[in-house]
Image (cartoon, rainbow, N blue to C red):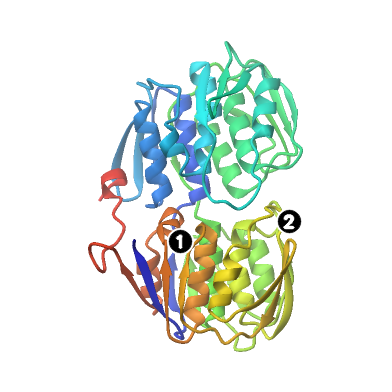
Amino acid sequence: MAQLLIEGGTRLVGRVPISGSKNAVLPILAACLLTDEECRLKNVPRIEDVSTMVRLLEAMGVEIQGLDSQQLHVDARRLARSDVLAAMANKMRASFLLMGPLLARRGEARVAKPGGDDIGMRRVEQHLLGLRLMGAHVDLEDGEYVARADRLKGATIHLDMPTVTGTENLMMAAVTADGITTIHNAAREPHVVDLAMFLGKMGARINGIGTDVLQIDGVTELSGASHRVIPDNIEAGTYAFAVAATGGEAVLEDVVTADLRAVMLKLRAAGVEVEDQTHSLWVQGNSRLQPVDVTTWPHPGFPTDLQAPFVSLMTQAHGKCVVSEAVFENRFQHVPELRKLGAEIHLEGRSAMVSGPSRLHGGSVSVPDIRSGAALVVAALCATGTTTLENIYHLDRGYQDIVTKLEHLGAHITRVDGNAPGARLDLSRVIGD
């Protein structure tokens, strides 16, 4: 029953540190199942999805210790189960990433249909097709996908589309398979690359990292490894849009600017000043934002995870633009909520026609999914008056310390929990104090 109360109208100014990538750390945690040696992960974000993945792994016998607020020590030598608890798997789609590592490590995996945000068709057939080509038998039994294989074998896999989780799952399954696996039309997102780099540190042989053709030469076993999770390019883009929308000025610290090229391109087209400072990004808003058309696309295109907050930014632009969603067909759930705040947005199929600048006003809105939550925060920061955000569990899933970070930029924002006003999310029992 927690809420966020945001009083808008204040320019965001200052410096904000960017946390570790949500989209990278979840498959990396899954990859720790591939070895019976210890792994140490650094720059782990303190978010609810990490907490859920940790509980999933612990339920299977994995020992996980928080070394400090951003480090996890993962020991899967006592992995005792090959099934994933359905009650937890239903909370997030990333639970399906355990299929490949479990099948590779134990020869069997039982994973419930994945849950997560309802943003459109995110079918797992490409995962299953690839596993079957590698010799696995996969069936649907009582709402669970059950996969079995005495020994996975290398195969040539052509993906219909560059599915991120499909690429990750198949890559993890292939690293200890017999022979060579080639994945064509592989996803190239930064978090896919980060997983491949972690697997390489464990002893995997992967060629073509960062391209759409991955060649994996299976090895007998993997070792433990230490790895620093990449900064979250989606969080960085969200703060960049928030700063630009409020006409502010800020430095985003600890970013990989190469992962933000599409964001920087669109910000500059909108008249926002952006300076690449190697490991940080300087952003300064403009009092007269220009409208910019965007179509989401797999990397290196504009990320679908940033479409929602970009729509909020465009409500403040002077003119009309079209924001099209080419990845997921149900990813405009933020639009009805933005309209409650006064946004002028018209939907036609998988495109949103945005007219601005809208004089947004405070109101009460509900967060339908993680990235829609980011859009509503950006809009609330621009609005006159106070906006109340309900159902902010989704924000907890994907954004570390969002209240504290925005406060440091000058935002008037308060978190109110049902039993303790002003309390903050505490994941210290999971990943350190």
Q: Residue furthest front?
A: 142
The x, y position of residue 404, in whole percent, is: 35, 68
Indicate the secondary structure of the residue bearing disc 2. Answer: loop
Mark 2 or 1, nearer chain start: 1
Q: Residue at x 69, y 81 (%)?
A: 355
Measured as percent of width and height from the top left, residue 331 is found at: 63, 58
Q: What distance separates the C-alpha of mark 2 from that of mark 1?
A: 27 Å
Q: Is residue 331 visible?
A: yes
Instruction: Give the crowd class for mark 1: few <14, some 14-19, many >=20 residues within 10 Å.
Output: many
Q: Quadrant of residue 278?
A: bottom right
Q: Does 196 appear above or below 271?
A: above
Q: Mark 2, residues whose alpha carbon is within 10 Å: few (<14), some, or many (≥20)?
A: some
Q: How many marks?
A: 2
Which mark is drawn over residue 326?
2
The residue wearing badge 1 is: 18
As drawn, 7 above or below 124: below
Q: Label 1 amino acid?
A: Ile
Label 2 or label 1, whichever lies nearer to me, is 2
